[in-house]
Image: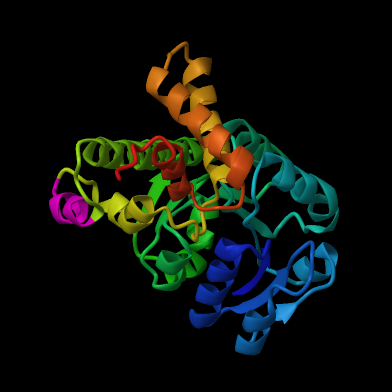
Amino acid sequence: MDIAVLGMGRMGQALAGRLLEGGHRVRVWNRTTGKAGRLVSAGAEEAQSIAEAVQGAGVVVTMLADDAAVRAVALGDLRASLDAATSYVDCSTVSPALSGYLAEVFPQFVAMPVVGGPAAVSARRAVLLVGGDVDRVDRLRPMIYSLSDTVRRYDTAPLALVAKLTTNLLLLSGVVALAEAFAVGRSGGLEDDQLRDLLGTSPVVAPGLHNRFDSVLTGTTDGWWTTALGAKDAGLALEIARAAGVELPEAEVVWHLYEAVAFRHADADISVVTDLYRRQAPTTS
């Protein structure tokens, strides 16, 4: 398939690379240039504008940071350039409301948020949450299954985003809980090696948290899911519940914690939330 990928953050690059490996023809675009060198070397074509990127494409994929970025691209140059017969797939983590609006605006729209980081995408181990009309989704099968065999299908685009934000909130909360468990252990005198031995392979630590176990333990800031994006996702999850009249006191705390740490470390991985607790840890002489 001829596929245009708009947005060359880490996830966008991983998606484009996986599509290239799947035998698709890929054209990429990013608002700022210079991020697609590796992909171009692997066979992708870099476009200088959105109009150039989508010309002749059978599928256009956006992987962007938030609602504002998706609105700017999708409802701006993309809307002006996209043929009505071209499939538009948004993989960004945005509000269900925006995803529903895009489904109204674009005749061939499908939401496909991704569970898993860039490494999981590259290794074809990510989970794809696909929401939209059955016929529209079926036309995308060659692209979808070149990305992953693990696909969860939903009747509408907004439901796929609800599923993504449900998953993200659980992971964000788990990272905070892990950081607090480490804080308890340290406060009572356990060393980091003892905490690793105690919890590193423990069944009480969810499998998804093991990817960040050492980062939370050591305070490493490298990673791909930034605290700013984590705070954004926790906020979107809260909006879903509030709209239904449901209060989420723990999620409120989690959201405020990521907001606080993002003020100092907006571009660091969500595991840096542990820094809030390390600052309070007692010192020993």
- Given residues 240 and 267, the one toward you in this image is 267
Residue 119: x %, y % from top left: 43, 68
The residue located at (50%, 39%) in the rendering is: 161
Residue 147: x %, y % from top left: 45, 68
Placement of 80 over or under 98, stated as above or below = below
Q: Quadrant of the N terminus?
A: bottom right
- Given residues 180 and 166, the one toward you in this image is 180
Task: Report which quarter residue 44 is drawn in.
Answer: bottom right
Residue 111: x %, y % from top left: 55, 47
- Given residues 83 and 67, the one toward you in this image is 67
Q: Which residues are magenta?
A: 193-203
Residue 209: x %, y % from top left: 31, 50
Q: Which is the main secondary structure of the residues drawn in magenta?
A: helix
Q: Quadrant of the C terminus?
A: top left
Task: Report which quarter residue 57 is drawn in.
Answer: bottom right
Q: In the rendered view, does 138 fall on the left or right side of 175? A: right
Q: In the rendered view, does 2 fall on the left or right side of 155? A: right
- Queried whether the magenta region covers residue 201, the answer comes back as yes
The residue located at (57%, 33%) in the rendering is: 259
Residue farthest along the front direction in this orientation:
285
- Queried whether the magenta region covers residue 82, the answer comes back as no
- Given residues 36 and 254, the one toward you in this image is 254
Placement of 24 over or under 113, stated as above or below = below
Placement of 73 over or under 36, stated as above or below = above
Residue farthest along the top direction in this orientation:
245
How many numbered dots are placed on residues in this image? 0
